[in-house]
């Protein structure tokens, strides 16, 4: 899809009142104006140009990309740069699975997972920005993917049913979470026993990856933070051009 046409579709989704039901919109307002409780494990620091001045386990949390940059998520070059075609086989998705795309944005990954789990599966597409939820709802509907269930999350809670999810994925999202400890705790609760969480993050170890440092994470850092939430490392796939695929599971 050409950038101009994509932008028109995205902004049409925002103006389409049916995209965000009144109850959903009310929840969005509450989420935006009610900050989560800060946990003492976080440290305040002077903000870098791309950070928020808050550190967790030794790293600064990055600024969130706003919904105004949504067209970048659907850019034509993304498949070539990130090789989603190589990522999907690593997830080992099967028809009928219940999966979650956390920080789903416009639903780029959610739509592709929906084809893998089929009409008998469920893809929870979670985002904290109501504008993004409106866009992904519109685009999923346009694609005829009724198995995608758009949800508005909170900054500290994915708001998914307990023990309901087989696999959750965060693609270039985790490093931007304002409350990573709390979000991971809520995600672990949502996983079924043996359920997996997949972290896809730009490799901090590789200076050739053309991404700002605060928007990268090392494999060791991902495993350290995920391990603190009780997740157990399963394996790391390294076949993508720029990103780690770190797979952990709930015991």
Image (cartoon, helix red, strand yellow):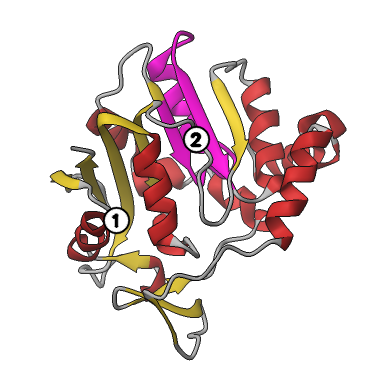
Q: Residue at x 54, y 17 (%)?
A: 147
**Callout count:** 2
**Where, by quadrant of the figure, is residue 24 drawn?**
top right
Please tell me which residue lies in front, 30 or 50: 30
Residue positioned 30% across, 22% down in the render: 93
Q: Is residue 85 visible?
A: yes
Label 1 – label 2 distance at C-alpha: 30 Å
Of the image marks 1 and 2, the number of the one nearer the N terminus: 2
Residue bearing the label numbered 2: 160
- 68 displayed left or right of 96: right
**Disc 1: CA contacts within 10 A as few (<14), some (14-19) or many (>=20):** many
Could you tell me residue 164's position as x and y percent? 40, 26
Residue that mark 1 sits on? 242
Location of residue 132 with respect to 222 vertically, above or below: above
Residue 16 falls in which quadrant of the image? Answer: top right
Residue 68 point in image, percent of width and height: 69, 57
* Picture disc at residue 30: none
Asked whether, in this view, residue 137 is left or right of residue 174, the answer is right
In the image, 8 versus 180, the foreground residue is: 180
């Amino acid at each position: 899809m050409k950038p101009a046409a994509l932008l028109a579709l995205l902004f049409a989704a925002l103006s389409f009142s049916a995209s965000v039901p009144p109850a959903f919109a009310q929840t969005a307002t509450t989420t935006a104006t009610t900050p989560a409780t800060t946990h003492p494990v976080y440290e305040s620091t002077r903000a870098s140009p791309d950070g928020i001045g808050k550190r967790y386990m030794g790293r600064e949390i990055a600024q969130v990309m706003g919904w105004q940059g949504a067209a970048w998520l659907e850019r034509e070059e993304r498949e070539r740069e990130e090789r989603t075609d190589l990522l999907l086989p690593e997830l080992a998705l099967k028809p009928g699975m219940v999966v979650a795309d956390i920080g789903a944005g416009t639903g780029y990954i959610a739509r592709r997972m929906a084809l893998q789990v089929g009409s008998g599966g469920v893809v929870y597409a979670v985002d904290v920005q109501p504008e993004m939820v409106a866009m992904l709802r519109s685009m999923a509907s346009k694609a005829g993917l009724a198995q995608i269930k758009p949800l508005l999350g909170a900054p500290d809670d994915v708001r998914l049913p307990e023990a309901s999810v087989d696999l959750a994925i965060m693609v270039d999202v985790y490093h931007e979470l304002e409350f990573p400890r709390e979000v991971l705790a809520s995600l672990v609760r949502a996983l079924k026993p043996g359920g997996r969480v997949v972290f896809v993050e730009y490799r901090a170890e590789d200076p050739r990856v053309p991404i700002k440092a605060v928007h990268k994470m090392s494999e060791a850092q991902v495993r350290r933070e995920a391990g603190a939430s009780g997740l157990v490392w399963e394996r790391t796939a390294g076949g993508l051009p720029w990103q780690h695929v770190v797979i952990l599971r709930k015991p």
